[in-house]
């Protein structure tokens, strides 16, 4: 079992990713594709005249402030634009792709963050209107049903909170939670960067290996900090291997599986003690 998370940044070639997934599926691999839609959400918000606001948690990780209006925009962008485009792209390569979200069958259960301490516009604030959540459970039955029928699940936020209402969740962390619940052999996080860089401004400073635990990485900024946090959660949950790699070029998924990008390891050694993941 391989779980692939495809980012929505401009440097990610979704056509190349889908083409590679189709080749892997044709070879008998069981695959789950997880995606977000941050760029599409921001673009739609601006078209609608809605301000795109960010919050910085005490850990230093930045996230979108998702009030009720922004959650509506996110649902329209992710479920109405990004997901159909990915499903159609995969279908064009002969893949039986099935679009799903964490809402479907209550697949991804979350606890809503009702009071978030964060820096907003540089000021310490307690945010109480955010519609984001922390994943607490993943029901893999819908994913396994699609896989058993020969399909490829295409999964995205949002999740479902304790009041059965949609909440935004980070797509990297959703991919990690899904990979852990499936006991996946490999989680591949595809991004615009070639992997984890010692110097974010220098692509030549790519690190072949990077050690994590389940705490935020100090000194790492931007979206990479969340990916490293997700990688630690995946390894702690029993995923066999995690790689962060470029989502572009020829066969980006296969190259990541064969060693391209950065292999993420547990701080106490390769992967997590005893974690092997399911057979592919």
Image (cartoon, rainbow, N blue to C red):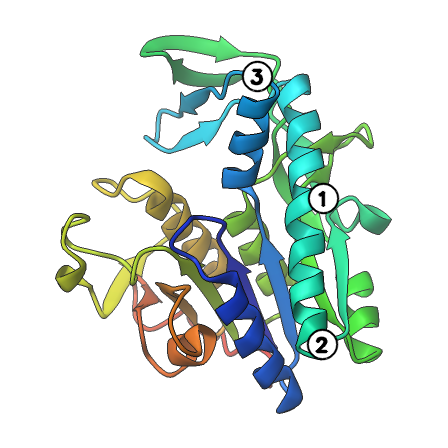
As drawn, 112 above or below 9: above
Left or right, 279 with respect to 248, comes to: right
CB contact under 8 Å: marks 2 and 3: no
Residue 241 appears at what percent x and percent y? 44, 72
Q: CA distance from mark 2 to mark 3?
A: 36 Å
List the single residue furthest toward the bottom.
Answer: 27
Q: Quadrant of the N terminus?
A: bottom right
Q: Is residue 124 among what the camera can see?
A: yes
Q: Residue at x 28, y 61 (%)?
A: 211
Instruction: Say which element carries label 2.
Output: loop
Instruction: Say which element carries label 1.
Output: helix
Q: Which residue is mark 3?
A: 50
As drawn, 230 above or below 114: below
Task: Using a 10 Å C-alpha cutoff, classify the residue at mark 3 as few (fewer than 14 neighbours), some (14 to 19) or many (20 or more).
Answer: some
Q: Which residue is mark 1?
A: 79
As drawn, 133 above or below 106: above
Q: Residue at x 59, y 30 (%)?
A: 44
Instruction: Say which element carries label 3.
Output: loop
CB contact under 8 Å: marks 1 and 2: no
As drawn, 176 above or below 31: above
Using the image as rendered, state which of residue 148 and residue 58 is in the foreground. Answer: 148
Q: CA distance from mark 1 to mark 2?
A: 19 Å
Q: Quadrant of residue 99?
A: bottom right
Q: Which residue is mark 2?
A: 95
Name which of mark 1 and mark 3 comes first in the sequence.
3
Q: Quadrant of residue 63?
A: top left
């Amino acid at each position: 079992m391989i779980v692939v998370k495809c980012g929505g940044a401009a440097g990610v070639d979704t056509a190349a990713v889908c083409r590679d997934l189709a080749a892997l599926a044709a070879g008998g691999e069981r695959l789950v594709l997880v995606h977000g839609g941050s760029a599409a959400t921001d673009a739609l918000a601006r078209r609608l005249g809605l301000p795109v606001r960010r919050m910085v948690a005490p850990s230093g990780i930045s996230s979108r402030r998702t009030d009720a209006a922004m959650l509506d925009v996110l649902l329209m962008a992710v479920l109405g634009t990004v997901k159909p485009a990915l499903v159609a792209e995969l279908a064009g390569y002969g893949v039986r792709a099935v679009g799903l979200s964490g809402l479907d069958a209550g697949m991804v259960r979350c606890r809503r963050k009702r009071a978030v301490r964060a820096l907003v516009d540089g000021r310490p604030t307690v945010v109480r209107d955010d519609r984001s959540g922390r994943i607490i459970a993943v029901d893999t039955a819908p994913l396994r049903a699609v896989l058993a029928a020969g399909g490829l699940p295409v999964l995205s936020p949002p999740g479902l909170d304790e009041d059965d209402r949609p909440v935004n969740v980070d797509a990297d962390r959703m991919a990690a939670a899904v990979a852990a619940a499936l006991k996946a052999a490999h989680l591949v996080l595809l991004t615009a960067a070639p992997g984890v860089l010692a110097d974010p401004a220098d692509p030549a400073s790519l690190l072949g290996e990077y050690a994590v635990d389940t705490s935020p990485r100090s000194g790492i900024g931007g979206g990479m900090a969340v990916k490293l946090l997700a990688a630690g959660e995946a390894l702690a949950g029993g995923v066999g291997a995690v790689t962060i790699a470029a989502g572009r070029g020829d066969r980006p998924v296969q190259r990541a599986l064969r060693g391209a990008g950065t292999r993420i390891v547990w701080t106490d050694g390769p992967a997590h003690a005893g974690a092997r993941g399911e057979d592919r």
